[in-house]
């Protein structure tokens, strides 16, 4: 996997560390950092502690300079709202959807999930929330097109590939080594690319992952030598670290 490094000397100053308050769950944390109903797209990163989360986080060591597991296992997109609750809709591709997969070919594996699923801070100790300079209305308008474009981007195939790795099926190797990105991240990249926004500038979109998106938000906050309208603001909280990587790095 080829990943270009950013030339930035310091991380994005508009993405800040924000610890949870005592006894605060993730839903309340999201509510504190969601921001106003400004029309901008929200992007969520979560890092879980379950067996599939572990497999995904370990696989993404390929995308880290110190080769330690990622803090992140999943990504989802949501719209702006002055009110955040459990039923808040998110667009995602979960490898363990609560209601099962249904028939993924009908939607190119895209799923409509709920924010409340990620409220438990014990199950999902790592959380990040970003506000992107992309109108949510534009993202929503492109969803039906992506659902019908398997010939251009087959998210069903990627989902099956990663399920094989997550479940340890046969000789299934790390898909990232073949530039086959984690489905939720690739879907987010495709939807935002269609709106003119590159989530992870240093990497091909099909090879994307939650870690690549994290690196994009933290380190690709400017492009040397040219103007850009790409803006990412947000907050994060890392409560669980695998391996020896520095906490919150």
Image: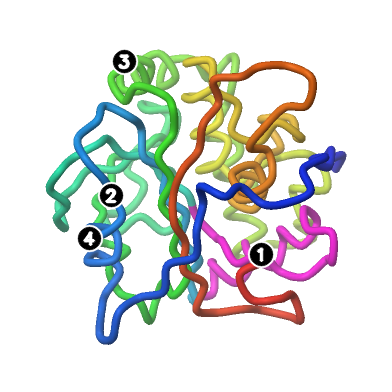
Q: What residue sits right under mark 3 in the picture?
A: 141
- Marks 4/3 in contact by CB < 8 Å: the verdict is no
Q: What residue sits right under mark 1 in the picture?
A: 70
- In front: 175, or 57? 57
Q: What residue sits right under mark 2 in the picture?
A: 34
Q: Which residue is drawn at the image coordinates 36% and 47% (left, top)?
A: 101
How many circles with numbers are drawn on the protein? 4
The tag on residue 116 is 4
Query: What SS does tag 2 mark?
Result: loop
Nearer to us of marks 2 and 3 is 2
Tell which circle, 1 or 3, labels the residue nearer the N-terminal end.
1
Residue 161: image location, x then y, percent = 64, 46
- Marks 2/3 in contact by CB < 8 Å: the verdict is no
- Marks 1/2 in contact by CB < 8 Å: the verdict is no
Identify the magenta region: 51-74
- Cα distance between the residues tagged 2 and 3: 22 Å
């Amino acid at each position: 996997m080829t990943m270009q490094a950013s030339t930035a000397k310091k991380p994005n100053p508009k993405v800040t560390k924000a610890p949870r308050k005592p006894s605060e769950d993730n839903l309340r944390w999201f509510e504190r950092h969601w921001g106003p109903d400004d029309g901008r797209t929200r992007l969520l990163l979560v890092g879980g502690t379950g067996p599939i989360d572990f497999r995904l986080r370990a696989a993404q060591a390929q995308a880290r300079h110190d080769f330690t597991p990622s803090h992140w296992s999943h990504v989802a997109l949501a719209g702006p709202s002055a009110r955040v609750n459990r039923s808040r809709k998110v667009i995602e591709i979960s490898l363990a959807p609560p209601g099962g997969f249904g028939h993924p070919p009908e939607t190119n594996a895209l799923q409509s999930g709920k924010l409340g699923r990620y409220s438990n801070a014990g199950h999902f100790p790592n959380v990040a929330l970003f506000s992107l300079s992309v109108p949510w209305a534009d993202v929503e308008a492109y969803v039906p097109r992506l659902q019908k474009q398997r010939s251009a981007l087959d998210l069903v195939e990627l989902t099956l590939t990663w399920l094989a790795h997550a479940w340890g099926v046969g000789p299934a190797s790390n898909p990232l080594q073949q530039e086959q990105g984690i489905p939720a991240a690739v879907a987010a990249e495709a939807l935002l690319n269609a709106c003119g926004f590159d989530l992870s500038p240093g990497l091909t979109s099909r090879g994307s992952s939650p870690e690549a998106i994290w690196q994009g938000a933290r380190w690709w906050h400017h492009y040397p030598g040219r103007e850009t309208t790409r803006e990412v603001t947000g907050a994060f909280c890392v409560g669980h670290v695998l391996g020896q990587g520095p906490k919150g790095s």
